[in-house]
Image (cartoon, rainbow, N blue to C red):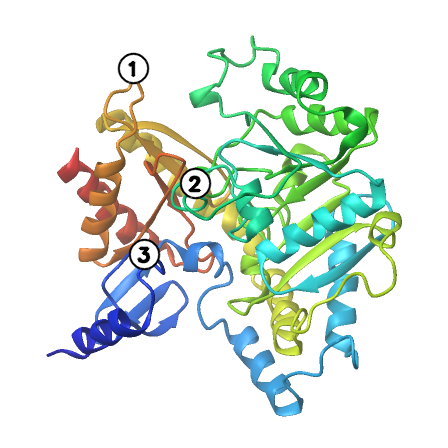
């Protein structure tokens, strides 16, 4: 029995089935954009730990920062005794976040925690409880965040009563417009619909915040029209509603800007960050207007492990890596290459219904028929399997599971990217 088989047997005995695995392999080492398994097989990683490894696996500055901090101390609990790295990272986040106004930042452990705290803060600051979220969105798996998440299976099905005061409206998903319209002649009907919701489902005086991803992540890398975010933000401003920008997947350089919302020239009231923030360590944050962040009472916000010193040092090293290695420029360059290849594949392979993205956040939507747009979920799963069998890690997304998303580390070499895309194209042809 191989080592892989032995570990899988132990996995099945000791770990719940609901904790899923996409591939049958077991990681042993990862550097840059390459992961090696315990049997010595190498894989080009086009998932980046699902959007976590923007600076690459085992990024030298990140590893060095973690080791040095581990020699000093690994934990104090910031609430008991604070430390410099938490304060410095908060300062940097406030400086980097869009908006020409004073900001403050707090840290937690995960994207879901960040979203939960952003909602708590918004509710406290506005003295309102309603939250407007979007179809096809993903915000986490906790009680509140799975309520905010749109997709039912596997995220919400069978887990009981959901949290109250969440109201869902269509996102600007133009390829599958909820109103059967076309942009720009639609006049952004999806924003006008939000105004209707404020009369038919919840009073505007009861809405604390609108929560939106700048670009849908799990929902399939849907990029809204350029004016959509501005129009939603204006609606919020007109009605005393806060605008929460969920940058957990799209942020930290993925779209060739540190925050994806910068592309849309909108200044959110609150921003949530996580995933690639700390180069693989669990860290998330909420950054927002000072008056909003300061609204909750003393002791109302906190986390035992939030802003762990190892993670904070790693995050500072991530920021240094972006600066020294010009990774925002790199994201734009490799994103353009992927988009060009995907568009070329779309012309030749009928199963590719749509190609979309921004920067190095690119996806293709697979359909059985380009006219009916029937989702090709099974084919997408087959594609992912073919890719990993040939040494390329990919991952699907979308409410119907028919979208292939690309989240390669931004340090991927041109040769690795070319090889990965070649294998992907070859696999597409085989399933198409």
Q: Of circles 1 and 2, which is in front? A: 1
In the current view of this chain or complex, which residue is farthest to the top? 185
Where residue 93 sits: x, y (%)?
73, 58
Q: Distance between the residues labelled 1 and 3?
A: 36 Å
Position of residue 42 relative to residue 23, above or below, is: below
Residue 139 location (% of width, % of height)? 55, 46
Task: Depth check: give the residue in front, 298 or 265.
Answer: 298
Is the Cβ of the residue at disc 1 closer than 8 Å to that at disc 2? no
Mark 1 lies on residue: 371
Per the image, label 2 sits on a secondary structure element best described as: strand
The Cα–Cα distance between marks 1 and 2, rounded to whole angstroms, is 22 Å
Residue at left 67%, top 36%?
165
The answer to which quarter of the image holds residue 100 is: top right
User: In the rendered image, which quarter contains the C terminus?
Assistant: top left
Considering the image in quadrants, where does the N terminus appear? Answer: bottom left
- Indicate the position of residue 35 as horizontal and vertical percent values: 33, 67
Q: Which residue is drawn at 71% across and 21% down?
A: 198
Which sits in the foreground, 365 or 402?
402
Q: Which of the two marks, 2 or 3, is nearer to us in this view?
A: 2
Q: Earlier in the sequence, mark 1 or mark 2?
A: 2
Marks 1, 3: nearer the viewer: 1
| Place of residue 351 in the rendered image (x, y in percent of width and height, measured from the top left) | 24, 28
Residue 415 badge: 3
Query: Is 17 on the left or on the right of 337, as rendered?
Result: left
From what the image shows, is residue 211 above or below residue 195? below
Which residue is outermost to the left? 1
Q: Residue 362 carries which label?
A: 2
- 47 lies left or right of 84: left
Report crowding for label 1: few under 14, some 14 to 19, many 20 or more residues within 10 A (C-alpha).
few
């Amino acid at each position: 029995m191989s080592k892989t088989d032995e570990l899988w047997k132990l996995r099945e005995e000791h770990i719940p089935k609901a904790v899923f695995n996409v591939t049958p392999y077991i990681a042993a080492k990862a550097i840059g954009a390459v992961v090696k398994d315990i049997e010595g097989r190498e894989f080009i990683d086009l998932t980046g730990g699902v959007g976590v490894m923007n600076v690459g696996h085992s990024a030298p500055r990140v590893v060095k920062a973690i080791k040095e901090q581990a020699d000093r101390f690994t934990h104090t609990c910031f609430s008991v005794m604070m430390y410099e790295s938490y304060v410095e990272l908060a300062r940097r986040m406030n400086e980097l976040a869009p908006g020409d106004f004073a900001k403050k930042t707090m840290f937690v452990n995960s994207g879901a925690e960040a979203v939960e705290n952003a909602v708590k803060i918004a509710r406290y600051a506005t003295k309102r409880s309603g939250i407007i979220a979007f179809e096809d969105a993903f915000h986490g798996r906790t009680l509140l965040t799975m309520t905010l998440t749109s997709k039912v299976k596997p995220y919400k099905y069978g887990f009981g009563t959901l949290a109250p005061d969440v109201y869902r409206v269509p996102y600007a998903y133009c390829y599958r417009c909820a109103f059967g319209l076309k942009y720009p002649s639609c006049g952004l009907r999806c924003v006008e619909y939000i105004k209707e919701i404020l009369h038919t489902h919840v009073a505007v005086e009861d809405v604390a915040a609108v929560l939106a991803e700048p670009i849908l992540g799990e929902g399939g890398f849907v990029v809204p029209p350029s004016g959509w975010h501005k129009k939603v933000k204006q609606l919020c401003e007109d009605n005393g509603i806060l605008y929460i920008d969920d940058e957990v997947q799209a942020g930290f350089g993925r779209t060739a800007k540190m925050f994806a919302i910068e592309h849309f020239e909108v200044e959110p009231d609150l921003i949530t960050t996580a995933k690639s923030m700390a180069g693989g360590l669990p860290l998330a944050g909420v950054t927002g207007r000072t008056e909003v962040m300061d609204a909750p009472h003393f002791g109302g916000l906190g986390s035992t492990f939030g802003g762990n010193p190892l993670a904070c040092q790693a995050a500072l090293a991530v920021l240094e890596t972006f600066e020294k290695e010009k990774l925002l420029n790199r994201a734009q360059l490799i994103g353009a290459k992927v988009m060009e290849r995907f568009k070329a594949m779309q012309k030749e392979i009928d199963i590719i219904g749509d190609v979309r993205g921004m920067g190095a956040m690119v996806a293709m939507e697979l359909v059985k028929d380009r006219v009916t747009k029937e989702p090709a979920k099974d084919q997408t799963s087959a594609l992912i399997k073919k890719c990993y069998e040939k040494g390329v890690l990919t991952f699907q997304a979308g409410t119907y599971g028919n979208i292939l998303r690309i989240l390669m580390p931004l340090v991927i070499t041109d040769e690795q990217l070319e090889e990965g895309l070649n294998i992907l194209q070859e696999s597409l042809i085989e399933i198409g």
